[in-house]
Amino acid sequence: MNRKVRQRVDEDGKDKSRKVRQRVDEDGSDMSRRVRQRVDEDGKDKVGGAPSYLLTGDEDAAPKVQESSKDWSSLTYDLMLHVFTLLDNRDRASLASTCTTLRSLGASPYLWSSLDLRAHRFDDSAAASLADRCADLEKVRFDGLDSAAALVNLKARKLREITGESCENLTDATLSMIIARHEALESLELGRGFGDRITSQAIKIIAICCPKLKKLRISRMIDVSAEAILSLAEHCPLLSDVGFLDCLNINEEALGKVISLRYLTVTRTLNMDWRAAAESWGKLPNLTGLDVSRTGVDHGTVSRLLTSSKSLKVVCALNCPVLEHDADFNPGRFEGKLLIAKFNDTLNGIASLFFEDNSSKMMPEDDTRRWLEGNLSRTLLSLTESNLLGLNGFWQKDGAKLFLRLMQSSQEEVQERATRGLASFIHLSDDSDSIYRERADSVVRHGGIPILFKLAESWKESFQSEAAKAIANLSLNADAAKAVSEEGGVSVLLGLAKSKNRLVAQEAAGAIWNLSLGDAYKAISRDGGVNVLMDLLFRWSYEYGELMERAAGALANLAGDDKCSMDIAKAGGANALVTLARNCEYEGAREHAVRGLANLAAHDDSNNNNAAIGEVPRALETIIQLTRSRHGGVKQEAAGALWNLAYDENNRELIAELGGVEASVALANSCMNNNTSRDLQKSAAGALWSLSNSEDHSIVIGREGGIPPLVALARSQYEDVHEVAAGALWNLSFNHVNALRIVEEEGVLALGRMCTSSPSKMARFLAALTLAYIFDRRMDESVRASPKHLANVRRSGLKYIESYINTFMDPQTLATAASSYTSSMLAKVLKRVRIPEVDILRCSDKEIERFVTMLRNPSPVLKKIAAFALLQFTVPETSHAEHHASLMHDTGYPKLLRIAAAATSMPHEAKIFAKIVLRNLEHHQPECSKGKRVSTSK
């Protein structure tokens, strides 16, 4: 039976996850001994302050952790605070919960100067729980804001920077409430995901309430009025960086009045008067950087700005169609100024800001470079996520190098966006395989893997998740996956999979899933990957379907290896996968859980996993139920699991008792729909092939209507589908009633075409054997058709068989072999006619008996096919040859074969095949004489 291990790759690059499920480690090592606090000469505790090396900026002076330290109480205040700085907020809370001293240390204002809440749900409750630590909070980042009160409830009156995304419900009123409580604000960035409910009125309130404002970036406003901009110019004298992104209308002339401006960003703004912009912005005395990417800016505007503004150094104009289609524009004539565009030498231009002349030495970082890195990372990320047409040349030339350079920025936000952009760049949705290979190769060639590993090993969870996602996409390429594995990526990813942050664990599991498709599965297994993946299934709630899907997908791939499948079984994998398939509502997780069970059951010749799965409570029942799923992938894998599991006799009987035969027939009938996938058709036919190994079940399949869909699948254009359908029909045709049903469903024509024209050698062989079963006279006793009609069909069927046999024996070979039955000649014929794929077929004693009996059939064609079949089943050194030879020796069939080979009525082809069978049996004689008889019921 042709049972295959199935592997599927997740190409999904998008994060569909919901809020992070928080888990706090309450375990605690023995921390009863208190950490001594650093005390001033006046005896006052210094718990609230930062360590001296951090205050001076001399990180080389940081105390080193001594591995041999035996007593926590001997550690200095500086050292313990240094330990806290290396932990994320969750681990800080866990460590601080162990004793009073560490709780006090964990509340140090230095540790709470910034707060990243993007991985958490930021609501009133979360804010209230953090408020007592946020008195000195200066920076906060969030993704999604349930209410304005959440920010207010932090009571962070010293807040200087607010960065937020995905706040569709934010209005002028809520934004005004936030701004009014934070008059020390210097930077306000409201990025992607903000709706159009913020108006110019909110801008005026920001201007009035935040006189120290230096940076303002707001997205997707419908209209930015002159009054609002002039209010900023009047009340915010320090404002140097302004960005209005993805807006509809901006008053260009008013922006020219904000004389403090150094950096202006208007990317993807639609309605712009570029003549007015050039005239007013060119007069700004301090304007250094301008970003007009993804707008309709023309070469005239760019030329006037670069010419008229003495302070302007950098203009970023990526993906500006009007500018790019002007063939006469020469950006090289603006000496000392940089234009970044698709048609320009972008990388060399950027290098002039980053590196000293003719040197690889980095120039000191300045505000312009920081601004450019930030804007480039935003624009490049946006371009990859939008997947716009016409950018392939730019991506192929500069994409990998740009992203990798930005990933080494000193700005954490730039690094994070660049890493996320790299993940999207590697595998854009409409890329061809060749383009994807080129991009993956470019990332590897330019040193991307060590850079990704460095980010993955950072203590920042946002870096970890983005790096893991990029590694996952990179690992879909076999060569890149090999490089990731060879450079130690497996251990890095397994470490990330243990993270208590769900997003990190999820992306790491996805990368392990992709790596497990190739040879890296060996490293995954060696480094304890099975236990790590199993722990993901046990540790996280089934609510997190994508995480469950990726862990189950990786386990399913590993289960394709015999050794790994045993490791999974020992770790309780069968039970875990059954439980996941039953209880998780996420269809992708169910699909790969069942695929994992199917692959665990695919090694029955080398381990007992197949039988063991049948003993798992409700395992077979669950799989049968999933054949009725509305999700095609789930049905396909459930049918594939039945295909493998039904190979075990005990499982086969249990499946039948639970209604699995009827369910499989129903699934096969549903496959007659043209919209059904190829893989589902194949799996449905495979389930019926396995179940039909029992003649009782074969009768039920025929009675319940299983033959019409199999005949339909036998007509499939896909060779793997009609091959499996032929295998099922071969089993079914052993019963004479089923044979008649095949005739009545016009199966003879479908089988005839298959055995004479299918590209699959196995399909042709199985079709010929099925026709032989149908027309060896056993069906005649139940014939309801007219004798004349049956005779015509029989003649057609025998002609198909004869045509098939003739493809193996040309006249010259036949004549030579018929005149000389020497061993060398028979060996030559065997080499010519052997079908290696037949090695997987294992016949019962009744099937062998039927072929031997067929040697005495009056039809010369049936004699030929019978001898040909026995030849294929007894080829030495094949998987089941010894079993077949044992059956034949134990029943005395060699004598009958010798009589048949000597009979004058035997066709020459049949004689030759019979002599080869006898030669094969002689090869197996020593083993057979010592072995026990093995018999399987049909």
Image: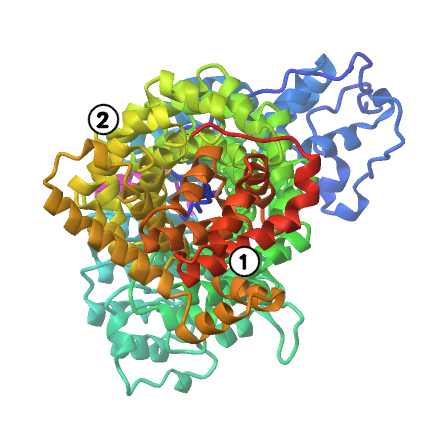
Residue 171 in the image: state x and y as whole percent.
Answer: 25, 33
Report the residue at 61% width, 42% height from top: 882
Name the residue at the front extreme. Answer: 904
Relative to the observer, which residue lies in front, 579 or 145? 579
Q: Is residue 95 above or below residue 321?
A: above
Residue 264, by quadrant, is bottom left
Classify mark 2: helix, strand or loop.
Answer: loop
Q: Where residue 296 is drawn, which disc sits there?
A: none
Report the residue at 67% width, 55% height from top: 486
Relative to the observer, which residue lies in front, 764 or 339? 764
Left or right of 224? Residue 362 is: right
Residue 377 in the image: state x and y as whole percent.
Answer: 45, 57
Name the amino acid type tagged 2: Glu
- Residue under label 1, please give it: 478
Label 2: how many Cα within 10 Å (few below 14, some 14–19, many 20+) = some
Q: Can residue 247 be seen by looking at this rendering?
A: no
Question: Tag 2 or tag 1, which sits nearer the N-term?
Answer: 1
For the record, the magenta segment spans 193-213
Camera-side mark, 1 or 2: 2
Residue 202 among magenta residues: yes
Residue 701 in the image: state x and y as whole percent.
Answer: 28, 29
- Residue under label 2, please give it: 704
